[in-house]
Image (cartoon, coloured by chain):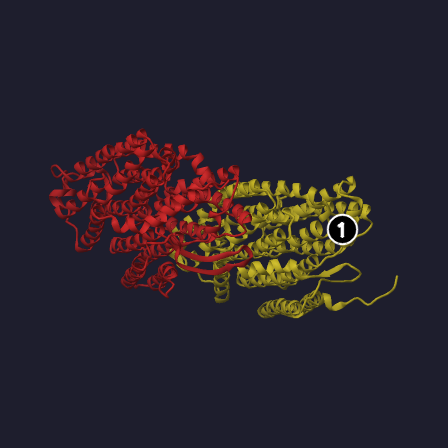
Amino acid sequence: MEFEIPNMSVALPEMFVLGMACLILLIDLFLTDKTRIITYLLAQATLIGAAIASLGHQLGSPEIAFSGNFIRDGMGDILKIFIYLSVFVVFLYSRSYLQARNLFKGEFYVIGLFGVLGMMVMVSAHSLLTLYLGLELLSLSMYALVAMNRDSSYASEAAMKYFVLGALASGMLLYGMSMLYGVTGSLELSQISAGVAATGADNMVLVFGLVFTVVGVAFKLGAVPFHMWVPDVYQGSPTAVTVYIGSAPKIAAFAMVMRLLVDGLEGLQEHWQGMLVILAILSLAVGNITAIAQTNIKRMLAYSTIAHVGYLLLGVLSGTESGYASSMFYTIVYALMSLGGFGMIMLLSRAGFEADRLDDFKGLNERSPWFAFMMLILMFSMAGVPVFLGFWAKLSVLSAVVEAGMVWLAAVAVIFSIIGAFYYLRVVKLMYFDKPEDDSPIDGEIDVRVMLSANSLAILVLGLFPGVLMNLCVNAFAV
Amino acid sequence: MSSDLPLLSLVVWTPIIGGLLVLAIGSGKHVLEARVVALLVALLTFAISIPLYVQFDVNTFQMQFVELYPWIERFKINYHLGVDGISMPLIILTTFITVLVVLAGWDVIQYKPAQYMAAFLIMEGLMNGVFAALDGMLFYVFWEALLIPMFIVIGVWGGPRRVYATIKFFLYTFLGSVFMLVSLIYMYFQADSFAILDFHTLRMGMTAQIFIFLAFLLAFAVKVPMWPVHTWLPDAHVEAPTGGSVILAAIMLKLGAYGFLRFSLPITPDASQELDWLMITLSLIAVVYIGFVALVQKDMKKLIAYSSISHMGFVTLGFFIAFTIFENTGSWKGAAMGIEGAIVQMISHGFISAAMFLCIGVLYDRVHSREISAYGGVTNTMPNFAAFAVLFAMANAGLPGTSGFVGEFMVILSAFKANFWFAFLAALTLIIGAAYTLWMVKRVFFGEVANDNVAKLKDINSREFIILAVLAVAVLFFGIYPAPLLEVMSVSVQHLLEHIAQSKL
């Protein structure tokens, strides 16, 4: 084999984030709690720098580097930009929350950045190996983050569950990958794709490998019946970590679905389409129905996430390019809404008080009409009521399944969205129709308040002009 | 014919932006300012809507005042507005009623009045949007977004069981409309466009038509509401504040009926013909059975709510007897009267139900009870008010000379051409309607002064007088001289009938 110097510039953003994460780890050693803000600022600067690196490189056609292990394409670039954006917002929301709980440590940011790196690798993976590397880097970071509040028994329990189940899922995924490798003789996705075409879709081992792969993917997405970790982890983690887990990793998980099922195994679409239909319907049903019974808003949003994963899968399973684009749109929209929802919980929290019960939202309209309105936008958007962004996301995935000839599936999905509307309405009901239980003013830091308002208003304004974001997603597949 | 100003956009966005302005002003202590601004915005919107009537060309069925801009290119969704003779009167009704609603809530609403006014203004804009939208998705966006302010209005300013009522309202209507969404998406892929006018010319097989018809039926029947999906309405009406009831009865119910005219009939004419027995049956059940239900109500608002359902039964009856008339007479001329009568009934019911709910609101503001038994002999203490109330009650019962008569009479007349028994059952309403309305009037207004509360009643103030007087003029004007309304719609209705006469199979 001829030795060639890989084209490093393709992975410039990844290398930048890696370097900066290591640098921040070192710098943080020399900082005291008073000057810890430097770590925070450096972490944010890293994300901005990575965004510049990703944007600065004009993309013609997809570029594959590192012996076919790494790809840089339109979809990956856009997903990465939204990963940076999400994590940037997460860091911003969580600063004062962490400070109030004595969790404002350098580790949060370093681990968070390593998680970002893992997500970036996942997004740009072009072989099973790179994908797995990225996935594990992300997963290990998340296990550590969940356990960060080590004195909380909830957090420890959540971290244990997450770790054990996550390891199991990774094992499944690896097992599936080994079968794929066995049949096709390659780890590289394009060669797997060619191998699938050569062997035909009815190869038994290949289909088995697909099943295990789908299980692994479903676990990472949190689709029913592989969702058990989601509510516990969402509820048990400090909210600053929940918002991290609930936003950017979903984008990465979507990328993983695309890389594995579409880039690698599109030849098996007739098989995975049926599997995803079942996963989607179960997720919609369990997520929406179980969410009704929750009293803890973090847990409720966890079940709502499961339901949203069901919608997200609708676009992928339609198996068309516009379907993939609509799922991508859904994922990004979901990440934005999730950021806002958990951000609102952090805004209402203060030292010694977690606003994680639904009842903590009672009478918010009396305490702060502005933020009640912001939460109203988020809730109606998640419920899929026009004119907010969430509606257009639902419209996109629904039109993808209708286009694929599955009108019945669209009908099933909308029935569950009615059930889902109930628990989002309940939050609005608590905020607007009930009297507040405590009258303490909402006094978040100014940066949090501004960002949260911008976040919610973005959902309204982008809902009025959804074409911009939609076209971005459609063009991602056109390059 | 058409002016340079984008009138329809103004009619949609002036109240929405004005509503946000009111929110911004009223967040502090500036309650009076917020009220004044709200009234000015409502008046301005009404003023903007007048040229829609004045400059309207009655000789064409084409959409007028059209505005067309691309909105979301990926799905070929356009910002496409326009009105014909069917939707234009409804827009003016909306802008007119909103002015009255803002006035009616003037000093009655003390809890967060700015949010109250803003909600109604935003609703006004959205309702105008529904009537003016010519793009299916734009229609759907307005249609659904409308639920949010109404949800808030009933839930925040409503009565004791408001939470139950408002969630029921929201989920019921949401249930109806999501299936419409699926149909719209399905038709988008058939027609490669979301334009309603493209849907009109889209050819579809019978099975597809039936499914689409049923999906639309669910959406519109809930909104109208038709028996048996009407149960949200009495709850919502009883719990809603007066303004909410007025908007619900006067305009929101019309959205459903309008949907039948704009979507169900022209898009799925063959399915409509196939299933017209279902529609006629449901309409007659609403007219007769719900009329009897109204008779036994003890709560005034509930009584009027049931009476609204019964009156809306006339509207749907008028729409769907068209096919039978055509079979019987072989001409579409007779059918036109049924549909025109139904539209007149929609407008007239907008005035009358608004007036009835405002009258109940007047009493409720003073006594804080809606029970019929809490009153008696009101005419002794509130003579001016009683005069208005009796007039509106007569109109509700369909007395000739009031607008309530015109629509009902036209529908019954054309029902005779369809089938004697349809007409017979529909005409029963003249008796039942008179019975429940006049019996209520007798118990509330006439007789001896029933109790101290009634004895202490003060007659209506000038604000209330103006509101009721304006409505009284409207009710009498359209009762005596409905021609302006009829001539505006007749070409559009004619065109609609010619359109649905052609099979789309």
Q: Which residue is at 45% across, 42% downward?
A: B502
Q: Is residue B440 left or right of residue A450?
A: left
Quadrant for residue A131, please give it. bottom right
Which chain is drawn using red? B
- Inspect the image, locate mark 1, and give the three-letter code of the amino acid beneath it: Ser
Q: Secondary structure at mark 1?
A: helix
Q: Is residue A146 visible?
A: no
- Is B167 located above or below residue A142 in the figure? above
Instruction: Give chain A's shade.
Output: yellow
Q: Is residue B314 above or below residue A124?
A: above
Q: Which quadrant, please, contains the N terminus of chain B? A: bottom left
The residue sitting at 48% across, 47% down in the picture is B201
State the residue at coordinates (77%, 67%).
A7
Horizontal arrangement in the rendering, residue B289 relative to residue A4 (left or right) = left
Q: Foreground residue, B408 or A240?
A: B408
Left or right of A182 in this view: B460: left
Horizontal and vertical percent position of residue B142 = 42, 53
Q: Which residue is mark 1?
A: A193
Question: Which chain letter goes with mark 1?
Answer: A
Q: Nearer the viewer, residue A246 or A459?
A: A459
- The local crowd at label 1, few if under 14, some if 14 to 19, many if 20 or more residues have their Cα within 10 Å, is many
